[in-house]
Image (cartoon, grey):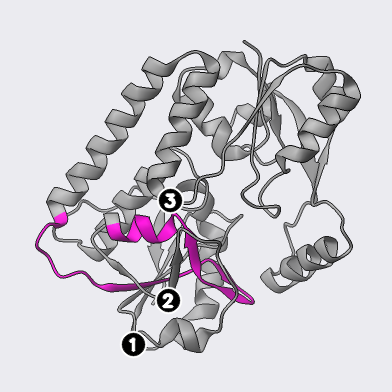
Amino acid sequence: MRLVSLLPSATEIVYALGLGDDLVGVTFECDEPASARVEKTVVVGGKDTRGMSPGEIDSYVRGRLAEGGDLYTLHADALAELAPDLILTQDLCRVCALPSGHVTDALDHLGCRADVVSLDPYSLDEVLDTIRAVGEAAGVRERAEELITELRGRLAAVSRAVAGRPRPRVTVVEWVDPPFTAGHWVPDLITAAGGDPVAASGGKRSVQTTYADLAAPQPEIVLVTPCGFHLDGAIEQARRVVPHFPVAQVWALDADGIIVRPGPRLINGVEAIASILHPSAVPPPPPGTAARVA
């Protein structure tokens, strides 16, 4: 089966299921594993926002959406040449990836007959369900179930380690300018790690808010997880957040690696957060995943 992934989390799922050799097309943002973007045909492009501030990125995104424009470009001819059997996409967030409707329209125009599977989880359980959905669509349901069992086992290990301990209040800042709440599955990560997510929108889209509202529940720990950034970028942005939370610990996390992409590495995120919230019960996170800035 020839697979095309139109979002980084789907690429990670494909590799986790041992289907990397079947993957023929990816997006310009697929960087895990690092070889994916080099070895596969890139069929979705977008604006390079490196060098732009969070405020500038926000203004660009809002402007494009207000104009009815797209944030991503589907290279339809390249997609057609790959002749995929299965395409993995999403409708969860227009800011994160190309909507599935755009893909279906392009396939109709090109006369391609690939199956299109949209992965749209809003909770951690639903993220695990998407692994099953990819496994079923790709004909490797048993592998998917084995992977889900392994991931749930790791979640259970964290749960045992933090059981009975006080649950610190945790605010997650998903974007710093303007500030956005934690949404979708992110509050589930906090809960699974033994924390109490506050000022959050679990199971719903992340929404714009104010720093006053984020600070109002008096969080003990603040996690800065800006979508689209790895640890270095998160550290830089977390420093801007510190003045808004003078009595809380402020941590930066590798957002794209372990927090915002709905794939298997979210369990790494739970483990990293648990080590921050309960350092005496959970081993420290691997280098490059988290850093305290205040």
Which is nearer the N-term, disc 1 or disc 3? 3
Residue 230 locus on image (x, y percent): 54, 53
Q: Quadrant of residue 69?
A: bottom right
Q: Quadrant of residue 226?
A: bottom right
Measured in 3D between alpha carbons, the distance from the residue under mark 1 to the one under mark 2, in whole angstroms, is 17 Å
In the image, what residue occupies the spot 56% across and 43% down?
A: 120
Measured in 3D between alpha carbons, the distance from the residue under mark 1 to the one under mark 3, in whole angstroms, is 30 Å
In the image, what residue occupies the spot 50% across and 13% down?
A: 139
Give the amino acid type for the residue marked by disc 1 in the picture.
Val
Up-down relation of residue 203 to residue 12 (above or below): below
Label 1 secondary element? loop
Which is nearer the N-term, disc 2 or disc 3? 3
Depth check: give the residue in front, 113 or 53.
Answer: 113
Extent of the magenta region: 162-191
Q: Quickly name the residue at label 2.
A: 199
Up-down relation of residue 16 to residue 291 (above or below): above
In the image, what residue occupies the spot 15% across and 57% down?
A: 162
Depth check: give the residue in front, 62 or 21.
Answer: 62
Which is nearer the N-term, disc 1 or disc 2? 2
Q: Quickly name the residue at label 3.
A: 123
In the image, what residue occupies the spot 47% across and 39% down?
A: 263
Label 2 secondary element? loop
Marking on residue 274: none
Count of labels shown?
A: 3
Residue 247 locus on image (x, y percent): 33, 87
Select label 1 or label 3 by which is in front: 3
Give the amino acid type for the residue marked by disc 2 in the picture.
Ala
